[in-house]
């Protein structure tokens, strides 16, 4: 089995889909690994380190992908109009595993499927105990939560911990985390370690104990509806308008007391919900900081700007793109482990061949295209909602180049007939393959949480 590691070329991306450790373990399993030259440079991993681990170094993207059974990437391959036509490098029968953003933008999945490429969307790995070591969302957002606190400290004009000095006492800063998923929990833990007084909110009752176990103070309207706000799978249910109004009032009362606010709410395949309004920003103390981890999906605050740090109403709003990539070396190491753990069961112990077991719920959960068929109806549905999804993400999309938009439009026209065929095939998929539990996320629910 040959595994290929391409260099990431998308803007703001510094990670790589392999580490020397993962390369070494793949070779021990009987695989040959080819890494594109310079793939790890932005993550402080040299070609020499990959070679020492047993990888071959290819000089071009085409040479890297040629003959590979499986291509590993951090982000989905690029279409022709986005720069290098990475999709065009693939041949029928090959496979790719990456963060495909399959539920929000299915264009690349459909393009690869049209070429007969098998596609694994790593963000769709099922949230079950056995798959925790393969969960890229958890590993990467964990780092995002940590980095969010450090970035907030950089722009906050005061110290976080309480200090008693000869010059007098300095009171600790108040940090408010909105959304208690993986990123939120790490943000709570990091802020607490730095000495801040930490508050957090989420509509899921189980998160109250998690917040308090980390030393945080829980903020929520705790009524009868709140007690029933979580599904058996641990996801939030959609709350009533009355509850939302009560929760909004409580948040509005809390925000003026906070120094740093970290928002983490994401809904798969949909724009990020607004958690902090402009009026609430106006109510905050001068010098306060808001870190919007959802800025790439439109933002949890309408004032945050993708890729920028801005000041509005005397409040600093941080909207850095690709938070995990800001810790590229650590993020790459963790992403590589996720991929290693995902791929290993598909390497036949005797023949060393790449085998896909559709009976394995982890494999089937991440599989979105196989043998010319889009296998996940959620991806097919994207074809009907892609335009509205992009419009809703206009805040982030406005920063994209006109060339990208034009290319996406042209690609959509060319692929229409093929995509409709794929959608029909996916619609014919037996109902038994649908997930048993498809919880409806609420506005403070993180996908990774």
Image (cartoon, rainbow, N blue to C red):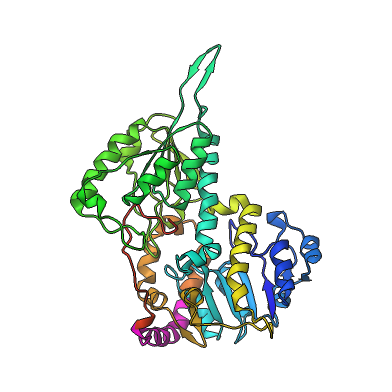
Locate residue 355 relative to residue 428 in the image: left or right.
right
Does residue 298 sit above or below 87 in this rendering?
above
Q: Position of residue 274 (x, y in %)?
A: 34, 50
265 vs 218: above or below: below
Q: Is residue 86 visible?
A: no
Q: Residue at x 49, y 24 (%)?
A: 162
Judge whether residue 412 is colored magenta: yes
Residue 435 visible in the displayed image: yes
Q: Quadrant of the N terminus?
A: bottom right
Residue sitting farthest toward the left: 242
In the rendered structure, the answer to whether residue 41 lies left or right of residue 235 reads: right
Q: Position of residue 238 (x, y in %)?
A: 27, 58
Residue located 48% across and 72% down the image:
408
Q: Is residue 124 left or right of residue 78?
A: left
Depth check, front residue: 92 or 2: 2
Q: Quadrant of the C terminus?
A: bottom left
Relative to 356, residue 123 above or below = above
Coordinates of residue 300 in the picture (x, y in percent) = 38, 49
Please tell me whether residue 283 belongs to the stretch shown in magenta.
Answer: no
Identify the magenta region.
Answer: 410-431
Farthest residue to the top: give it.
Answer: 166
Q: Identify which residue, 149 or 419, lies in the foreground.
A: 149
Tell me: residue 43, above or below residue 346.
Answer: above
The percent coordinates of residue 259 (x first, y second) are 42, 32
Q: Residue at x 63, y 68 (%)?
A: 340
Image quarter of residue 94: bottom right
Could you tell me how many numbered marks the image carries? 0
């Amino acid at each position: 089995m040959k595994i290929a590691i391409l260099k990431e070329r998308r803007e703001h991306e510094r990670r790589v889909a392999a580490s020397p450790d993962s390369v070494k373990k793949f070779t021990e399993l009987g695989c040959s690994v080819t890494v594109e030259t310079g793939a790890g440079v932005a993550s402080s991993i040299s070609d020499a380190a990959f070679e020492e681990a047993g990888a071959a170094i290819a000089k071009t993207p085409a040479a890297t992908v040629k003959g590979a059974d499986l291509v590993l990437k951090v982000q989905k391959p690029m279409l022709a109009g986005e720069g290098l036509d990475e999709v065009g490098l693939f041949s029928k029968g090959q496979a790719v595993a990456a963060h495909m953003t399959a539920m929000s933008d299915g264009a690349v999945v459909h393009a690869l499927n049209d070429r007969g490429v098998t596609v694994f969307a790593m963000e769709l790995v099922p949230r079950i105990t056995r798959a925790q070591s393969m969960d890229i969302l958890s590993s990467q957002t964990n780092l995002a939560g940590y980095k969010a606190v450090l970035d907030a400290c950089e722009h906050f004009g005061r110290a976080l911990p309480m200090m008693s000095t000869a010059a007098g006492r300095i009171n600790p800063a108040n940090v408010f985390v909105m959304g208690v998923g993986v990123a939120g929990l790490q943000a709570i833990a990091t802020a607490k370690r730095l000495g801040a007084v930490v508050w957090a909110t989420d509509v899921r009752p189980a998160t109250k104990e998690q917040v308090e176990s980390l030393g945080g103070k829980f903020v929520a309207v705790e009524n009868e509806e709140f007690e029933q706000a979580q599904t058996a799978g641990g996801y939030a249910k959609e709350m009533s308008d009355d509850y939302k109004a009560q929760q909004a009032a409580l948040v509005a009362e809390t925000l003026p007391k906070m120094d740093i606010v970290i928002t983490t709410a994401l809904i798969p395949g949909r724009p990020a919900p607004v958690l902090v309004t402009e009026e609430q920003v106006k109510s905050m103390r001068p010098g306060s900081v808001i870190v919007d981890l959802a800025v790439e999906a439109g933002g949890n605050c309408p004032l945050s700007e993708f890729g920028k740090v801005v000041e509005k109403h005397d409040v600093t709003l941080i909207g850095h793109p690709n938070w995990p990539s800001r810790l590229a070396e650590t993020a790459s190491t963790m992403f590589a482990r996720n991929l290693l753990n995902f791929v290993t069961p598909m390497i036949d112990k005797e023949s060393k061949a790449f085998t896909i077991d559709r009976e394995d719920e982890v494999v089937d959960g991440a599989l979105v295209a196989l043998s010319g068929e889009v296998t996940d109806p959620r991806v097919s549905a994207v074809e009907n909602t892609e335009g509205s999804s992009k419009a809703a993400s206009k805040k982030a999309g406005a920063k994209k180049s006109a060339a990208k938009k034009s290319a996406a439009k042209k690609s959509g026209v060319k692929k229409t007939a093929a995509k409709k065929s794929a959608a029909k095939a996916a619609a014919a998929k037996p109902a038994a393959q649908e997930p048993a539990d498809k919880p409806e996320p609420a506005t403070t629910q993180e996908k990774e949480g």
